[in-house]
Image (spheres, coloured by chain):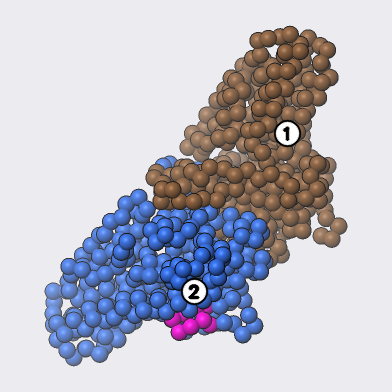
Chain colours: A brown, B blue
Amino acid sequence: MKIRTIDWDKNSIKIIDQTKLPNEFNYIYLKDIKQLFAAIRSMKIRGAPALAAAGALGVVLAAYNIRRKKPGQFIKELLRVIDYLSTSRPTAVNLFWGLERMKKVIEANKNNKAEVLKSALLSEGRKIMQEDRIACRKMAKAGSRLIKNGDRVLTICNAGILATIDYGTALGVFYQAKKEKKQFRVFACETRPLLQGARLTTWELSKNHIDVTLICDSMAAVLMSEKKIDKIFVGADRIARNGDTANKVGTYNLAVLAKWHRIPFYVVAPLSSFDNNIKTGRDIPIEQRSCREITHSYFKKPIAPSGVKVFNPAFDVTGHELITAIITEKGILRFPDR
Amino acid sequence: MKIRTIDWDKNSIKIIDQTKLPNEFNYIYLKDIKQLFAAIRSMKIRGAPALAAAGALGVVLAAYNIRRKKPGQFIKELLRVIDYLSTSRPTAVNLFWGLERMKKVIEANKNNKAEVLKSALLSEGRKIMQEDRIACRKMAKAGSRLIKNGDRVLTICNAGILATIDYGTALGVFYQAKKEKKQFRVFACETRPLLQGARLTTWELSKNHIDVTLICDSMAAVLMSEKKIDKIFVGADRIARNGDTANKVGTYNLAVLAKWHRIPFYVVAPLSSFDNNIKTGRDIPIEQRSCREITHSYFKKPIAPSGVKVFNPAFDVTGHELITAIITEKGILRFPDR
């Protein structure tokens, strides 16, 4: 089954509405920037590498929609859109990286006609997507070398096809290992509150015939204590200069458990997830999301008393000392002491 | 608000249907053993100490319902009911302890008339409930000494009023601390899959004016790394001779995190939760429950693809080396090295 997480189609951004998975698989077309902003914020599209493309295609979409085509006005409007999109979600650095790439195209074309700039922006958006495709396959090949026959691997959230253009970071490693005919099985943490592990990861792994077992986040420790997990692979939303990694909340928990049980813990992420402006994980902004994600979303009825206080960070930071290695498209970065 | 988790009323067992909380608060009357068995298995009534009472009152209920009153037949029938109830759930030892107490009453009255035995069973059932009430208050007083002003404490599942006759084990400690006018706040892990933390613990703590914040299970690690948790208090379903403790799945995860972050980890449980027949936690039977608890229960629609494999242990075992102390009605049991 061919899944296309995000694409440019019919002068619109075409995405899968991921909030509806696994019960409904629908493509939707985002026709203006407000629709895109809402889709990013509500996580119809999510995943750090996919957000780089979403940001970049957002600038293309704006360029197609802006009526005032005087170069100065056109560029001013595009820069305003970039500022606006950069407020949609704060943690994944790839979004800003994608927008930054588009800014450079605007700068390079500042003396050109709007039509020329528009076309340059679309070609840059497509290039970003193509680069992600290639990066994912390179990470997958590098990571797959770590998978041995018989391995039981654990992952959290969705770092797969649905989080990238079309292959995945952590899950890409599994797709490659499968391609190489390795025998292994995956345990997927359901990933509360929005259940990306249950809804998205088990869905795409099953579609691709990978043996997957769903667990609640709190059950990973049981598997580890029973020596049923050999390796852990996760994605990343932002990596600081020292290797500290922000990823979906629950990742840090797994990393501590992995250290305690002496299980290798791998981060799989493209170089676009590295933020060289940030020295350590302490400086990574962590998005706090609505209480209702925990108490209401996906439930028939609220699962907590009305008005209860809730703490809902969307991400956490795993210190580099808990990470065995980071797998990128340029190879495996090992910490010297590990 | 007076909450009565379980009671003998109108020749029936009166319980709160806990599966409906927090949206509906209803008492239901269990009029025969099959209804009781179903209520235990579906967790309308749950919590280790409450299950001791449920088992004991189940024998009373049987005694009231049995028509054949010839002593031999009557006792044979009662013993059959005890065997049947002991298959309702495997992990909490309190259920077996409660049934064992009733067996002794049967033994002691084997030469008496059915009516005498019936009345002895009811009085034993009431005694078990009264003992639990007293034990909870003693544990609460012992445990409350560990709570300091300003403490931020964490708990999982529901070890409160709803898990006992009427005061709680871990949450009883908080009720007592509140009574002593201590200032503290509680973080409650939602406790997937059946959300006893979200549905029951925040509900009963709020009703009793205790400052409570709900988190997903995977977020406890974030709070600990930010030094926002001072102590952890949990209940127990079965404690082996060496102190290894089975409790709701997720407890072992918290205990590892607590050790890693150097946070005291306390188990609060009555002596009826100790199983002296069992040497270590490895021998505690762990209940595996339905996949649908993870993929379907409480959700509007299934949250995972149909047919996905699921691992759903209802409990896990925390090694005694991770436990700072066990708080019982006879005082605080500290491990020599801690």
Q: Which residues are magenta?
A: B326-333
- Rendering coords of residue A63 (x, y %): 69, 16
The residue drawn where x is 64% and y is 36% is A89
Asked whether disc 1 touches disc 2, contact meaning CB atoms under 8 Å apart, the reply is no
Q: Which amino acid, by three-letter code, is at mark 2?
A: Ser
Secondary structure beneath disc 2? Answer: helix
**Left or right: A39, with A338 as reference point:** left
The residue to which callout 2 is attached is B144
**Left or right: A90, with A306 as reference point:** right
Which one is in front, B149 or A78?
Answer: B149
- Rendering coords of residue B284 (x, y %): 49, 74
**Left or right: B139, with B264 as reference point:** left
The residue to which callout 1 is attached is A96
Q: Do discs 1 and 2 belong to a common subunit?
A: no
Q: Which amino acid, by three-letter code, is at mark 1?
A: Phe
Q: Is residue A261 above or below residue B223?
A: below
**Left or right: B332, with A269 as reference point:** left
The residue drawn where x is 66% and y is 38% is A90
The residue drawn where x is 39% and y is 45% is A301
Q: Is residue A4 magenta-colored?
A: no
Quarter of the figure that contains the C terminus of chain A: bottom right
- Rendering coords of residue A121 (x, y %): 75, 20
Q: Nearer the viewer, mark 1 or mark 2?
A: 2
Measured Cα–Cα span from mark 1 to mark 2: 50 Å
- Rendering coords of residue B72 (x, y %): 18, 84
Q: In which chain is the residue bearing label 2?
A: B
Secondary structure beneath disc 1? Answer: helix
Residue A205 got which mark?
Answer: none
Q: In which chain is the residue bearing label 1?
A: A
